[in-house]
Amino acid sequence: MPIKINVPFNQKDEAKKLGAVWIPDVKTWVISDSIENINPFKAWLPPGGGSIIKYPYLVGKSDRTCWKCHKETPLIAFGSKNYFTTAFNPPREVLWDKYDVPVFFQDIKSVDNDLVPVLKKHFPFFQDTYSKTLKKNVWVNTCIHCQTIQGDDYNFDNPGSPFYSLNGSFLQNRKTELLQLRFDYYLDAVINEGDYSYIDDGDGFRFYDGPTYQ
Ligand SMILES: [Zn+2]
């Protein structure tokens, strides 16, 4: 699906020259799927970096026992096997790289505006919530009974966690659903690569799904 970009009116000719397309009914410029390198458009992408999730828009589903009220409560996690991210590049220069290794996203600081009504409708327990621990707002799973935050550290990070993944097990044998969205969506979040290790190929890190070299 296309990626929305935020092009000021006086830069529209420049965006068009680079291949951006105007979508009149929603009054936005987009980068079409045929464009593999989105860096020429980075002035109109979120300046602080983050991730842009391309189709299919996967949502992992699980549940846990609420740490506070001890009742069962559902959980979701955004997943992707096709996305751009800046997460592993130095912050000085934001560069968007494309990855096709399945991952989950956690510690979500902000979500695309297009995602908000979809979450409200289908997963209202996943909310923009003030965390007393972090002293800021985060997008997190909350208990459907007592509304308490169900922290991402428990949900992702340890063997046995609902979204913990071993090599190659991402999104497999899980309840996964698709979000219906017209455009690719943006997330400011930490990428959970599970037990994937990295190799440095010289111009940054890449996921590597082989054994971990000590
Ligand atoms: Zn609870």
Image: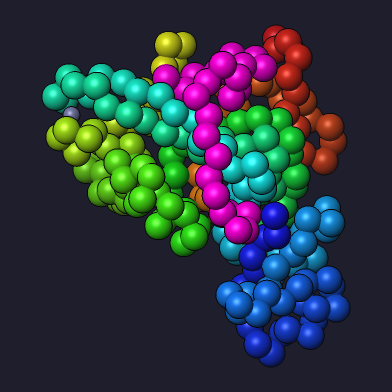
Question: Residue 124 in the image: x percent, y percent?
Answer: 31, 45
Residue at 68%, 21% in the rendered image: 197
Position in image of residue 181 (x %, y %) = 56, 54
Residue range corresponding to the magenta coloring: 162-185
Q: Is residue 111 left or right of residue 123?
A: right
Quadrant of the image occupied by residue 6: bottom right
Whether residue 49 is visible to the viewer of this picture, yes or no, is: no
User: Toward the viewer: 64 or 154?
Assistant: 64
Q: Residue at x 43, y 52 (%)?
A: 118
Instruction: Determine the residue located farthest toward the bottom in the rendered image.
Output: 10
Question: In the figure, 108 relative to 167: above or below?
Answer: below
Q: Which quarter of the image is occupied by the N terminus? A: bottom right
Q: Residue at x 60, y 64 (%)?
A: 47
Q: Quadrant of the C terminus?
A: top right
In the depicted structure, whether residue 57 falls above or below residue 150: below
- Residue 209 position (above or below residue 92): above
Magenta stretch: dominant secondary structure: loop
Q: Within the magenta stretch, is there residue 19? A: no
Image x and y of residue 213, in percent? 73, 11
Is 176 placed left or right of 110 in the picture?
right
Q: Quadrant of ligand 1?
A: top left
Q: Is residue 182 magenta?
A: yes
The number of numbered badges drawn on the structure is 0
Horizontal placement of 56 versus 206: left or right? left
User: Residue 109, percent across and down?
Assistant: 43, 49
**Up/down of 6 relative to 153, above or below:** below
Residue nearest the viewer, comparing 91 with 25: 25
